[in-house]
Each structure stands twice: as C-alpha cells, then as structure tokens.
Amino acid sequence: MTATLHLGRKISKIRELRGMKQDALAAALNISQQAISRIERSEKVEEELLEKVATALGVTPEGIHKFNEEAVFNIIGNNYHDHSSSVQYQCAFNPIDKLIEVFEENKKLYEQLLASEREKVVILKQVQKK
C-alpha cells in the first residue's frame, strides 16, 4: 500500500500522535484553529507554512512528507506485540523520553495560553474601568 500524498492528513496524524489539539497548534503558529482545520484538509501545503507547522510539531518538513501511518503502527506492533514478523523496525529513541518531551512542550504551550488569557483579563478590566 502506497502512502498518501495528502500533507494535511499527515499533519493531522502527526499532531494527534504528539498529543496536541488543533487549538494548541494554532496558538503555536499564531493562527486560528479554523486555519489549522483548513490546513489539515488540504492536500498540498505551501513549503513556508509547512516549515512552520513542522517546527511547531517538533519534526522536519521532510518528516511530514515521508510520514507513513502504516509504518508507525508497524513500529508499535513489532516492538511491543508481534515479534514474528519478518520486517522488524527498531525504535531509534526511547518512547518514554519522547512522551516526556511532548508533555513538556504541551505544558509550555499551555502556560503561554494561560498567560495570554490572564493578559486579556487585565486588559478587559482596564477597559471596563474606563
């Protein structure tokens, strides 16, 4: 089975595997959640935007281009369940380390969003006083 060339779907799958919601990715790119939704529905993505998305997701643009969901499931399956397959994928990283890394990245994004919301509250209180 050949991998789909639909970059938007690849971005969506990578985002989901990273445990990131559309609004968190949108905040990291300083765009709306609706813009992320449009990107993820797009078959093609401009290279400049793809680079920004890749950076926000912690991958390279080439990684998005070459992403193959089937290979990911094979890696997971072969490393944790089925060792009888003739094709073996070796994980080049410690999955626990990656989970911690993603958690820390998401924590930073959450803190940025929280700080932004606090700033909005302060501004709204100032406007309300006037």
Image (cartoon, rainbow, N blue to C red):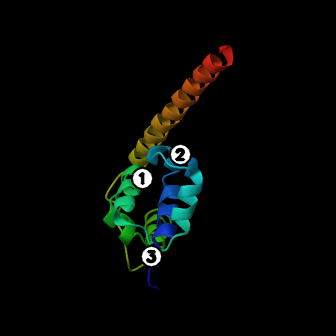
Q: In this view, does 83 lie above or below 123?
A: below
Task: Give how far across and how far down residue 107 sits, in percent.
Answer: 49, 36
SS for callout 1: helix
Q: How far apart are marks 3 and 1 (CA)?
A: 33 Å
Q: Can residue 51 be seen in this view?
A: yes
Question: Which residue in the protein does label 2 denote?
Answer: 24
Say which element carries label 3. Answer: loop
Q: Disc 1 marks which amino acid?
A: Leu
Of the residues tagged 2 and 3, which is closer to the observer?
A: 2
Residue closest to the eye, 9 or 99: 9
The image position of residue 28, as x and y in percent, is 46, 45
Q: Look at label 2 and name its amino acid.
A: Ala
Question: Which residue in the rendered view is the most extreme toward the bottom?
Answer: 1
Badge count: 3
Disc nearer the start of the sequence (2/3): 2
- Whichever of labels 1 and 2 marks the residue nearer the N terminus, that label is 2
For label 3, the residue is 84
Tell which tag, 3 or 1, sits nearer the viewer.
Answer: 1
Residue 21 visible to an observer of this rendering: no
The extreme front residue here reads: 130
Question: Of 93 and 116, which appears nearest the observer?
Answer: 116
* Residue receiving disc 1: 57
Circle 3: residue type: Ser
- At mark 2, the secondary structure is helix
Which residue is at 39% across, 80% downward? 86
- The answer to whether 127 appears left or right of 47 in the picture is right
The outermost residue toward the top is: 129
Residue visible at 44% across and 38% down in the picture = 104
Instruction: Judge the density around disc 3: few (<14), some (14-19), many (≥20) Cα neighbours within 10 Å.
Output: few
